[in-house]
Image (tube, rainbow, N blue to C red):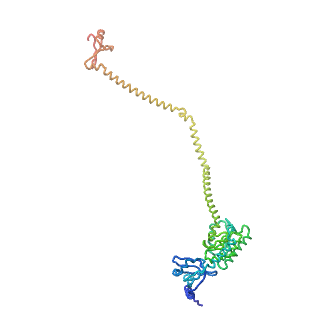
């Protein structure tokens, strides 16, 4: 059997031709959500009611012909006139709006505000009625879609930051007509399980989580019955629905609102993270303290080694030997008797005596030289050289005068001295 196989582009092209020829200049009433303006001046939004949603686009040229578009906001109920178009690359269809007319506040937005006022008047939002969130919950139940991104984000943060917290995942449908019933059933099952569980297995905290979306996507968490169930829950609850700008009835009724599922995981594990960080810090300080302590003990152990003790004893012995050697009187004779001082004084006296003798000798030598010069001048021989002479008796006396000569005996032997010698003479002859 042969099949008429077509390409995707062929099917999308045929659907495009059928829709665009069939649905032209259609008027559609609905509520605007997810309204955004592109940098090129095009408007994109979702047109929805309780059961369905349709993408819509109002391009710049048509937007200029609809100036009231600048006053329209999310939640507004409008009537649009335009053509149904198919975008081939994605295989999706949307309404290309040519004209838009505000009708009034949208049904979903109006219903949300109405329920919000009702529950607020009944005290479901009162802060004094909210239960405190456990600082360190041990068992946490999270109600969300089992395969949703919100659960994965929550688990990733839980695994990274938690220490001892157990996580119980309760799957539930979080979008569509069956979502309110599914979420309420999951909440009832968690409460029932906790009430019947042993103390160590009781649930400490319940988290309702869902990722971001349009108002209709998050509508399940605006259910009135779910609001009463959350308010009457004996277990503290955290509502983590959508993004930071998204608000649901569950956010107002729950004991705490988290901007996102990831933020809820961070809030729950905050105290554990602080303890974990403190434990890491204390661990580092303990390791440093132990390292310092071990280093000190290691030094003490090294000092207690036999070789170290032996070196200490040998050094001590050497010091004592030096001290003992100083007590040896025989070796310290000179030091103790000060005989070295006497030796020094003796040496100095000897040197002074030598200098005095030398000076005295020089002085006497000078005087001797001087006396020799005087004697030389007085030497009679020097006169004899001028032709003089003198008589000397045999006994060595000089005959210095006539009277001395007359007193000599006759024939007395004498010497007559000349400068170049002497001759013997007798008195008779003279």
Judging depth in this view, the residue of 273 and 164 nearest the camera is 273
| Residue 218 rendering spot, x and y as whole percentages | 63, 76
The quarter in which the C terminus is drawn is top left
Image vertical order of residue 341 relative to residue 104, above or below: above
Q: Is residue 190 left or right of residue 92?
A: right
| Residue 118 rendering spot, x and y as whole percentages | 68, 74
Asked if residue 198 shows in the view, the reply is yes
| Residue shown at the point (54%, 32%) measured from the top left | 337
* Residue 77 quadrant: bottom right
Image vertical order of residue 82 relative to residue 257, above or below: below
| Residue 295 rendering spot, x and y as whole percentages | 60, 54
| Residue shown at the point (32%, 23%) measured from the top left | 373
Judging depth in this view, the residue of 331 and 93 nearest the camera is 93
Asked if residue 93 shows in the view, the reply is no
Residue located farthest toward the left when viewing the structure as drawn? 387
* Residue 274 quadrant: bottom right
Judging depth in this view, the residue of 158 and 344 nearest the camera is 158
| Residue 419 rendering spot, x and y as whole percentages | 27, 19
Judging depth in this view, the residue of 107 and 51 nearest the camera is 107
């Amino acid at each position: 059997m042969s099949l008429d196989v077509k390409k995707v582009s062929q099917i999308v092209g045929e659907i495009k031709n059928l829709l665009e020829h069939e649905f032209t200049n259609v008027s559609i009433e609905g509520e605007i959500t997810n309204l955004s303006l592109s940098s090129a001046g095009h408007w994109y939004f979702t047109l929805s009611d309780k059961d369905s949603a349709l993408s819509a686009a109002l391009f710049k040229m048509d937007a200029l012909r609809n100036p009231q578009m600048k006053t329209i906001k999310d939640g507004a109920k409008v009537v649009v006139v335009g053509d149904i178009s198919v975008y081939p690359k994605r295989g999706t269809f949307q309404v290309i709006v040519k004209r838009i007319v505000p009708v009034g506040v949208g049904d979903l937005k109006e219903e949300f505000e109405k329920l919000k006022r009702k529950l607020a008047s009944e005290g479901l939002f009162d802060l004094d009625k909210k239960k405190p969130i456990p600082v360190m919950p041990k068992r946490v139940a999270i109600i969300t879609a089992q395969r949703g991104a919100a659960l994965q984000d929550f688990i990733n943060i839980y695994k990274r930051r938690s220490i001892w917290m157990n996580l119980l995942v309760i799957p539930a449908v979080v979008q569509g007509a069956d979502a309110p019933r599914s979420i309420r059933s999951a909440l009832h099952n968690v409460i029932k399980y906790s009430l019947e569980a042993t103390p160590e297995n009781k649930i400490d905290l319940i988290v309702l989580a869902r990722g971001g979306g349009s108002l209709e996507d998050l509508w399940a968490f605006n259910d009135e019955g779910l609001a009463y169930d959350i308010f009457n829950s004996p277990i503290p609850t955290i509502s983590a629905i959508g993004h930071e700008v998204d608000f649901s009835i569950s956010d107002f009724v729950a004991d705490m609102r988290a901007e996102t599922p990831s933020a809820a995981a961070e809030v729950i594990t905050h105290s554990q993270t602080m303890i974990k960080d403190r434990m890491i810090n204390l661990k580092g300080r303990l390791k440093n303290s132990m390292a310092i302590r071990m280093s000190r003990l290691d030094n003490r152990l090294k000092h207690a080694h036999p070789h170290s003790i032996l070196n200490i004893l040998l050094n001590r012995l050497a010091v004592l030997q030096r001290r003992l050697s100083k007590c040896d009187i025989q070796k310290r004779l000179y030091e103790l008797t000060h005989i070295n001082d006497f030796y020094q004084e003796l040496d100095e006296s000897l040197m002074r005596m030598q200098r005095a003798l030398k000076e005295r000798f020089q002085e006497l030598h000078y005087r001797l030289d001087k006396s020799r010069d005087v004697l030389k001048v007085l030497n009679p021989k020097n006169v004899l050289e001028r032709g003089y002479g003198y008589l000397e008796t045999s006994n060595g006396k000089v005959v210095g005068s006539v009277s001395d000569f007359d007193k000599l005996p006759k024939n007395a032997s004498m010497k007559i001295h000349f400068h170049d010698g002497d001759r013997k003479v007798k008195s008779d002859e003279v």
